[in-house]
Amino acid sequence: MEDLQVVRDIIDNAEPQSVVFFGGAGVSTESGIPDFRSAKGVFNQRYPYPPEVIVSHSFFEEHPDVFYDFYKEKMVHEDAQPNQAHKKLAELEERGILRSIITQNVDGLHQAAGSKRVHELHGSIHRNYCKQCGMRYGLDAVMAADGVPYCECGGIIRPDVVLYEEPLDQRVMQAAIEDIAKAKTLIIAGTSRVVYPAAGLTDFFTGDNLIVINRDPSPLDRTADHCLAMNVGEVFNW
């Protein structure tokens, strides 16, 4: 695995704040959280409605009960723990090498591992708010509810995650773009890069080392400086 050692050396010897990590669902699969688009992923399982429809804004507005049945069963994994990738990234940030993490995941495992500068493109299951009064709630309030969670004011509580048909937070996007533009090494891991506009963020990279880590082929493979067809946790196990 000569290329693996080269990648590890690039990261270990990187200048301070020069590495940015862009991760997708494949970063958390080793924590027991299923991905979305693989053959066994959430979006390829059978449900009364297509999963992409269930997690859309309009469907949530019309059928919050069905949404929450799906959300609690398939989107929330309370027992999941950070894996080796999450832990190593937190260590690299502590060492001053890693500038930031940009994640498409909503599970909060990077923060649980100790990472502090995390740009959550699609929000987080750990942040929730009342649609009517704006009161903030943690994940416990959502999971403890029998069906749809309601606020004290009577409004529906919704997760602070980006649903289909909704725009990304422009402040988060801008911060992610700025970090990618400043990076000398960009690591793209565990993502097929098919969800836009997040997938277009990598176009802002003009650094020296583009590293792609993904079990399955991705559009970036042919342009990457280093491409590893491996589990993310395996790559970061040193």
Image (spheres, grey):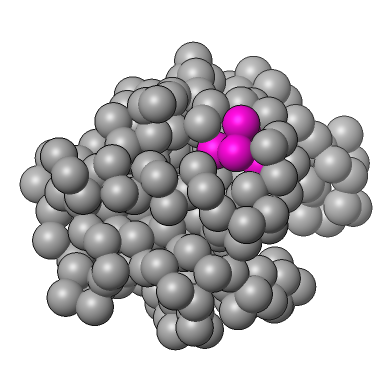
Position in image of residue 125 (x %, y %) = 60, 40
The secondary structure making up most of the magenta span is helix
Image quadrant assignment for residue 139: top right
Compared with 231, 160 (above or below) is below
- For residue 38, say whether it is visible: no
Q: Quadrant of the C terminus?
A: top left
Name the outermost residue toward the left.
39
Where is residue 167? Give x, y as percent.
Answer: 59, 76
Q: For the magenta stretch, what is the residue range?
A: 89-93
Is residue 151 found inside the magenta-colored segment of the image? no
Name the spot of residue 114 as percent of width and height, x first. 68, 29
**Which of the pair 29/143 is nearer the observer?**
29
Query: Which residue does the image show at 79% across and 48% down from the upper left?
Result: 130
Q: Residue 200: in sight, yes or no? A: yes
Instruction: Determine the image quadrant of residue 102.
Output: bottom right
In this view, the residue farthest toward the top is 79
In the displayed structure image, the side of residue 41 where residue 131 appears, left or right: right
Q: Nearer the viewer, residue 177 or 196?
A: 177
